[in-house]
Amino acid sequence: MDNASLFFSPGTNKKDFADILHEVQEYISSKYATLISHNPHDQKQQIMAYINKYLTDYGLGVEGLEFDVLAEKLYSEMAEFSFLTEYLFSNNVEEIDINAWNCIRVYYADGRILPAREKFNSPSHAVDVIRRILHKSGMILDFSQPVIRGHLSNKIRITVFGNPVTDHDKGVAASIRIINPQKLGREDFIRNETATPEMLDFLSLALRYGVSMCVTGATGSGKTTLMSWILSTIPDDKRIVTIENGCREFDLVKTDDDGNVINNVVHLTTKESEDPRQNIDQEKLLEFTLTANPDVICVGESKSAEAMAAQEAARTGHAVITTTHANSCSATYYRLVTLCRQKYSMDEKTLHNLVTEAFPIILFTKRLEDNSRKVMEITECEIDGEGRRSIRTLYRYNVLSNDYVDGKVQITGHFEKVSDISPGLKKRLLENGMPANMLKELLKGGTAA
């Protein structure tokens, strides 16, 4: 036993957390040469052992913190991402918005938006922690690169604004998005009243039997989460290829209890390069994917010229699902036309005809004022024998009232089935293999429950 431990018992020597952190950091830095394990779990155990020893030997403690809590907090500060670690790997947090070093908001899966319980110690502390996160994706935040987009894992995406585009005394501003932390399933969407069982079954079966669709809405409206579920319903023998920009948000691979992969999925991401010849964007990945025997293609987000390639793929008979940003189903087609024109100088009418043929189904998602997410509308673009287009609303969410109850917004509304799919789409589903009895069940009329 160290001589110091003869005079101190754990926690008797109270200090500020920052002072103890500085002492422990110096102590641990002298021990790094002995940390021989490359296994993250084993390495954490070793570091925690050194932290516990130092705290015990010198009787260190922080007012209001239990010994084990203090040790974990020190480890997180040194080897992880400070207090953000708890939120980043929680299964009920969807987003963390950092407005300044001392202003952090946390968005929870149940719709709550609350201030974080903690804050950074200073502007420089905020910068240090965010740089640590960006380091995971090989990116550097500095004066010459003050705006960065990176990722921490397949499910965590981060956009950062630093000095000089933000005020120096604010540290950083950042948006950290955790995609589908709870891997929501059909029953979750029904329980959360995001959509009705009938709506969800229609979307799942439409893609399963070769009908391409676009999921549209604002950032945070639940597009990616819903699209991920739709893709998860594709039969295991069908080959799914996902194409994402920069970092991977989808994780559709299924395994059995022995770790064997049981479905047929390829996840692809873009690769940026200063050399244009080595740059691999979504459009190029989509071009190569068409020769890779896909049954279903997912283009994570159509926001540039890849929209043109996506609609081309859909019109050649592949089932394609993608997302874009628009504020209604009808506006989605005009948004896609705008994106296609970024690279191809076709007239608007021609492009409108192409995108409406490519994506017969549009679903519009929205986060309402009470923070609930709804599929506000599902439409079909019907094309008659003369080539005339008409938008047929299949399902819709009707808002009946907005009220304040105990200082909170309360929205009352209901889902409605407006019309059946067109005869042309019925014929297409049957030709693509949908059993007649399944189609009959899908076409049962009435108001969706």
Image (spheres, rainbow, N blue to C red):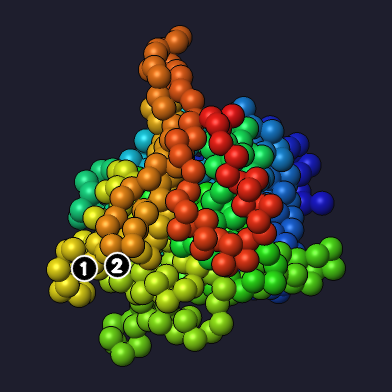
* Numbered circle sitting on residue 261: none
Q: Quadrant of residue 403?
A: top left
* Residue 388 located left or right of residue 19: left
The answer to whether marks 1 and 2 mark residues whose Cβ atoms lie closer than 8 Å is yes
Q: Amino acid at mark 1?
A: Thr
Q: In front here: 259 or 22? A: 259
Let me know if residue 330 appears in the view: yes
Let me know if residue 176 appears in the view: no
Q: In front here: 325 or 446? A: 446
* Residue 157 located left or right of residue 229: left
* Residue 174 located left or right of residue 222: left
Disc 2 is placed on an element classified as helix
Q: Position of residue 373 (x, y in %)?
A: 47, 36
Q: In front here: 96 or 51? A: 96
Q: Is residue 84 above or below residue 31?
A: above
Q: Amino acid at mark 2?
A: Leu
Which residue is labeled 2 in the image? 354
Q: Position of residue 244 (x, y in %)?
A: 45, 68
- The C terminus, quarter of image: top right
Q: In front here: 314 or 344? A: 314
Which residue is labeled 1 in the image? 350
Disc 1 crowd rating (10 Å Cα; few below 14, some 14-19, many 20+) is: few
Q: Is residue 154 above or below residue 34?
A: above
Q: Who's the residue at 46% across and 39% down the image?
A: 419
